[in-house]
Amino acid sequence: MLVLLLIGLGPIISLLIAGTIAEVNGCALDEGGRHPCLVLGVDLGEMLYLMAASFWFSFLTLPLAALATLSIVVMGLTDLIRRLNR
């Protein structure tokens, strides 16, 4: 279930990482297109753009994350009820 949760939240995590890298290095990051971003002499603009644009996949993966979270909660509550009944 935790793997499904990580897969579901992957696009959002990717966006947060890309935004952090761009902000720390003073680079522009938007969905309008690729912007040059030099980090330690390497242009990461294309990679950051793809990481940020992958956010759109979250519309497909967030329901998966919600289902995994719900399953984890139900399993936890079931286990708690079983332990309390003993």
Image: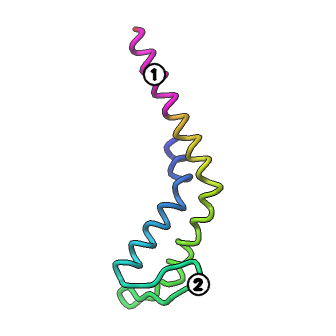
Badge 2 amino acid: Gly
Q: Is residue 41 left or right of residue 7?
A: left
Q: Report the magenta stretch's main SS.
A: helix
What coloring was used for the rendering? Answer: rainbow
- Residue furthest out toward the top: 86
21 versus 77 height, above or below: below
Badge 1 amino acid: Asp
81 versus 9 height, above or below: above
Residue 74 in picture, x, y percent from top left: 52, 28
Part of the protein shown in magenta? 73-85
Identify the residue shown where x is 62% and y is 47%.
Answer: 63
Residue at disc 2, secondary structure: loop
Distance of mark 1 from mark 2, alpha carbons?
Answer: 49 Å
The residue where tag 2 is placed is: 33
14 versus 21 height, above or below: above
Check whether the beta carbons of the residues at disc 1 and disc 2 lie within 8 A of each other: no
Few, some or many C-alpha atoms within 10 Å of disc 2 (few <14, some 14-19, many ≥20)?
A: few
The residue where tag 1 is placed is: 79
**Quadrant the C terminus occupies:** top left
Residue 40 in picture, x, y percent from top left: 35, 87
Residue 77 inside the magenta-drawn segment: yes
Residue 23 in picture, x, y percent from top left: 38, 78
For marks 1 and 2 on the same chain, the one whose residue lies earlier in the sequence:
2
Residue 46 in picture, x, y percent from top left: 54, 83
Identify the residue shown where x is 63% and y is 57%.
Answer: 59
Identify the residue shown where x is 55% and y is 34%.
Answer: 71
Identify the residue shown where x is 50% and y is 28%.
Answer: 75
Residues 56 and 47: in front is 56
Q: Is residue 39 left or right of residue 68?
A: left
Q: Is residue 22 left or right of residue 10?
A: left
Residue at disc 1, secondary structure: helix
Which picture quadrant has residue 21? bottom left
